[in-house]
Image: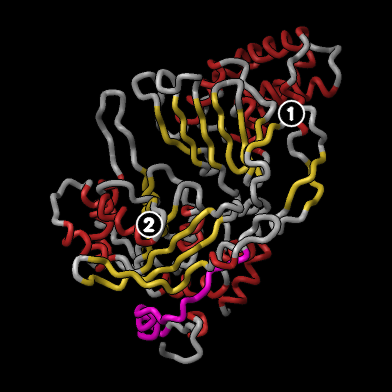
Amino acid sequence: MSLSDRLQAARLRRPEVPLLPPPPEPLVAEFHSSAPATTAVRDLRGTTTLADSHFELDDLNDPLPPAVEAVRVAATEALYDRIGNRLNDTSLSESQLDELARGELATIIAELAGMLTDEQRARLITEVADDTLGFGPLQRLLDDPTISEIMVNGPDHIYVERDGKLLRTGTAFRSEDKLRRVIERIVSRVGRRIDESSPMVDARLPDGSRVNAIIPPLAVGGSSLTIRKFANDPYLASDLVEFGTLNEEMVELLYACVNAKLNVIISGGTGTGKTTLLNVLSSFIPSNERIVTIEDAVELQLQQDHVVRLESRPANIEGRGEITIRDLVRNALRMRPDRIVVGECRGGESLDMLQAMNTGHDGSLSTVHANSPRDAVARLETLVLMAGMDLPLRAVREQIASAVDVIIHVSRLRDGTRRVTHITEVLGMEGDTVTLQDAFAFDFAAGVDSFGHFLGKARPTGVRPRFAERFEELGIALDPRVFGLDGIHS
């Protein structure tokens, strides 16, 4: 099956939530619980359509009448009395525990509140179940597929990102203690801890969504919680093409790069979609290869069967037992990997990663924070020096030039879209400088339209990369028109 056929077939699995939000207009908007259930929103193409608000449940956060609030408190206590000893029963799955709790809740509320309406009963069951088993008032936001990020600034201020816009919700925690309890529930599930002696933590939800929490005394206005949600159905290359992040020629080139086992670094700023793009590239790895992934908190959603997933571990309360990314990279070299995928290089592990790339572990993938391909090289230099080996700068640059074959830079533009702006080849050293050559570059000169959308796109530079010779050696067919060439050679 050709690549175009694979892309066409993959479109059938397109997830519901778009990767690329439309331009934020306004950047921050206030959302009131009295908003109508149907609001005007913009789709990916900038046209205005009607869609369900998905915040129709915010009216559940209005203060409960005193009598109903008393029933809620009593129902919560009664539920703990009946099943409290089973909340940590490892023999029960999450779905079984949820079914058990909701069944008991229905019985308890029927006994306690015979005069309540059906709507009030349903609200009580939802709130008590979320408080007991879920993530409290955040549960409805987590269940909303149109929300990409949740930001909690203390118990009374909860914001979300939807379609690239920040919205303040009517949702709130009843107290700082309730918020702290939810944070502790999240981090304890992945073996992390958070307290006054360790007031910051990175964790993840069961679906892989990224979580960061910070509590007082570091967070002065109350505990802060940030959740970056991941799509339940991982994005495919066809989705990125449809969203405009890539075009089909770029996908063909990157598919060939991964299959030719070129070492690839994805660079970009925070929130530009580096991990999403890394997921897509990793889907190009043949299924008969052994893949070892290394991350601070597991986020990658690889679809292959032969995958070993490694996750770093912070120190315990005694300051012992820490396992760093660098430790895991070193250990991975002894695990007979065909591919090593590091979620993000952010420290001394960069040196070990470059050495692995230079010693036969071709086809490695990783990401790095940078503002351009040139900045990515400088960033790697800085990270290698953090390893504390006191290497001369020229030796570091030679390591980078020898190890890295391709740098893919992804940016979030002013119109809110995420675009791959550069696919850059690392040529080698020229004097003391690492030389780079763009195969694709974004055309910023095309300007913007009346809605503020960028009209340009990434275009081939017309230069045939040197690594194209490797494609020919391995029998990987790639049309020279991908590079904007009519012939075989530039």
Q: Secondary structure at mark 2?
A: strand
Vertical relation: 88 (above or below) 364: above
The quadrant in which residue 218 appears is top left
Residue at image coords 46%, 81%? 462
- The type of residue carrying mark 2 is Ser
- In the image: residue 87, left or right of residue 289: right
CA distance separating discs 1 and 2: 41 Å
The image quadrant where one finds the C terminus is bottom left
Kindly tell me whether residue 395 is visible in this rendering.
Answer: yes
Front-most of residues 45 and 387? 45
Residue at the spot of label 1: 32
Circle 2: is it few (<14), some (14-19), or many (20+) Cα within 10 Å? many
Vertical relation: 91 (above or below) 105: below
The residue range painted magenta reads 455-475
Give the mark nearest the N terminus, 1 or 2: 1
Residue at the spot of label 2: 366
Q: Secondary structure at mark 1?
A: loop
